[in-house]
Image (cartoon, helix red, strand yellow):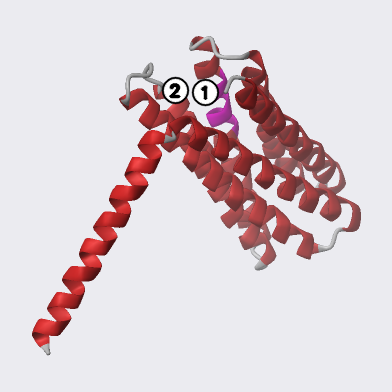
Amino acid sequence: MIYGVTYASRVALEYNIRNCEVVVRVVDTYTEELFVAGAVVVLIGTLSTAYGQTNFTVTSIEEWKRFIIKGNGIEAFGNTLQAIARDKESVHGGERQTQGITGSWLQAGGNATNAVATNLELAGALIDGQKLNVFGSGIQSFGAALEANATLVLMENDLEVLGYGASSIGALLDSIGTFFVLKGSEQRGNHILMIASWIQVIGAILVVVGLVGIQ
């Protein structure tokens, strides 16, 4: 019986190792495609966030925030794909993109933080959630600024630079809007948040168009 369990565990382990090796080979082979896929995922996330924020601003119905949570989670996943792709590109002979890699991870962390923060708001911990949202959006803004600068330094296309720049501004406005809400100016803050969310959509579109244009 023990032998059977041990053998089954070894087979499962070998199977997982083989799967990991396949994933690594795919990532190594399709680095550029992975980066574009990450950008598309980020775009989908920004659309979900903007949709939820717009409807919440108009109706004040808390349930719309669920789209914001999902959107931030999707964005974090897309940022992670981009961070992995940037790192792999630098390992395989590309220029070292320390700023770009750091920026992607910061955006992933910022978006994940925002997802947790908005979930706290829905759970009733409004103040804690809003404070965390200010922090998360600030991290996002800094991360996008690093990506914009990295893209500019590497002399890649202008649309990408503009896209990351717009994303940075949008995330900064998101932080400012949440700060207004935190201080009691809910109407003004939510309108800033709505504008910020669509600026980030525009930024994500510019990045995708720029990347597809240089493939």
Q: Are marks 2 and 1 in contact (CB under 8 Å)?
A: yes
The residue to which callout 1 is attached is 146
The quadrant holding residue 83 is top left
The quadrant holding residue 91 is top left
Q: Residue furthest left?
A: 3
The residue to which callout 2 is attached is 99
* 165 over 81 or under it: above or below: above
Q: Residue at x 37, y 19 (%)?
A: 94
| Residue 183 in view here | no
Count the numbered circles shown.
2
At label 2, counting other C-alpha atoms closer than 10 Å, the crowd grade (few under 14, some 14-19, many 20 or more) is some
* 172 over 22 or under it: above or below: above
Q: Nearer the viewer, residue 121 or 180?
A: 121
The residue segment tinted magenta is 141-148
Question: What percent of the width, then of the height, locates residue 194?
Answer: 81, 42
The kind of residue on which mark 2 rests is Gln
Dividing the image into 4 quarters, which one contains the N terminus?
A: bottom left
